[in-house]
Amino acid sequence: SDGVTFTRNPDNPVFAPKGAWTNGRAIDADVIEFNGRLVLGFATRDPTGKTQLQGIATAPVDSHFGKAAWTQQTDHPTLKPELPWEKSCIEAAAFCKHSGKLFMFYGGAYNNEPQQIGCATSSDGIAWTRVFTTPFLANGKPGEWNASESGHPFAFTDDDGRYYLFFQGNKDKGKSWYLSHVEIGWKNDTPVILAP
């Protein structure tokens, strides 16, 4: 009630994916309100536990957000690794809204393989299409602070309407970690990274 002190929902865990395509785990949750409901992005794995996949569940925005409120929207991944740079992992959905659509920034490939950030869009929050076939935000060049990865994004829309993409990076295969951000602009309703 105050944004500082939290009480666990007695229904916890409130959501776990089901179906032959998933091993039942759900991590890297991000939630956004869209068209009167909450859209929950989650990462899960295939039954072998090797490939990280993206799924979507929704709940009414006026619900109690317990187990009965969430509905898994597909019986298959909403995004799965398909591009060479994504390797065996799509995770860490980070949502924002622009021009009546949802945009999802996501980590492609596992940490330090390198992980890089991709982007997909949706008009309903369920069916997603990649915006680019190359990373939206790539890892750095050898020797740069994010040479090992630019990953695990978080999208933030400020009160003034500006968009920021936060992400983690390192240059030593995960021995150290740093957080950074870029500002996102829009060109023909497509996200672009603005020069600092």
Image: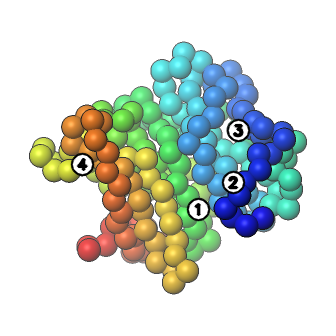
- Residue at 77 percent across and 50 percent down: it is 7
From mark 2 to mark 4, how far is it between C-alphas? 30 Å
- The label nearer to you, 3 versus 2, is 2
Count all numbered tags in the image, as a single digit: 4
Task: Note whether residue 124 is visible.
Answer: no
Tag 4: residue type? Asn
Residue denoted by label 2: 39
Left or right of 8 in this view: 152: left
Q: CA distance from mark 4 to mark 1?
A: 27 Å
- The residue that mark 3 highlights is 74
Q: Between tags 2 and 4, which lies in front?
A: 4
Label 2–label 1 contact, CB within 8 A = yes
The amino acid type, in three-letter code, at marker 1 is Leu
Judging by the rendered image, the residue that carries numbered circle 4 is 146
Who comes first in sequence, dot 3 or dot 2?
2
Q: Measure the alpha-carbon separation of dots 3 and 4.
A: 35 Å
Disc 2 marks a residue whose amino acid type is: Val
Q: Quadrant of the C terminus?
A: bottom left
Q: Position of residue 168 (x, y in %)?
A: 36, 50
Tell me the SS state at disc 2: strand
Q: Is residue 189 left or right of residue 141?
A: right
Q: Find residue 59 and report its horizontal and vertical position in percent.
A: 79, 52
Quarter that holds the N terminus: bottom right
Secondary structure under tag 1 reads strand
Query: Residue at the spot x=42%, y=74% of the render?
Result: 186
Type of residue at label 3? Thr
Give the Cα distance between marks 1 and 3. 17 Å
In the rendered view, would you say 20 is above or below 100?
above
Residue that label 1 marks? 102
Q: Earlier in the sequence, mark 4 or mark 1?
A: 1
Residue 66 picture location, percent across and down: 83, 45
Q: Position of residue 60 (x, y in %)?
A: 82, 56
